[in-house]
Image (spheres, grey):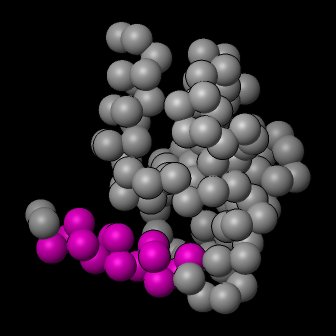
Amino acid sequence: MNIIKKLERQIKDNIILIYMKGTPSSPSCGFSAQAVQALSACGEKFAYVDVLENTDIRKELPKYSNWPTFPQLWVDGKLIGGCSIILEMLNNGELQTLISKTVQKYKKDN
């Protein structure tokens, strides 16, 4: 599978997806750790891809998303942003609302 198709499938198949360095239980950079903490505070399950273990994704995702850094949070097929945006959204309540509404949307669809 070519890398663009792989990215599109991951983003489509996971309503909440974070591309990060490391894993949620063992992040490999401070920005990924902060982003995971913020996302975890919302109380919903999320998927992740460790870009350190997936060099093709680490190389191609910034071009695909037009976002140069990691982590990258994708919700319902849309790029939300990186660590600073995630933290800002958490602090003003937007992240919790977005995550909750997205999860509810997909619960209704099933």
Q: Residue at x 56, y 82 (%)?
A: 94
Compared across the picture, whether 30 is left or right of 98 comes to: right
Q: Residue at x 35, y 71 (%)?
A: 102
Q: Residue furthest top?
A: 1
Between 47 and 1, the residue placed more toward the observer is: 1
Q: Residue at x 45, y 76 (%)?
A: 98
Does residue 36 lie above or below 38 as drawn? above
Stretch of the chain drawn in magenta: 95-108
Between 98 and 43, the residue placed more toward the observer is: 98
Quadrant where the C terminus sits is bottom left
Q: Residue at x 75, y 41 (%)?
A: 69
Q: Measured from the top left, where is residue 83 in percent x and y? A: 75, 59
Residue 93 appears in the figure = yes
Does residue 2 lie above or below 96 as drawn? above
Q: Is residue 102 magenta?
A: yes
Compared across the picture, whether 90 is left or right of 10 comes to: right
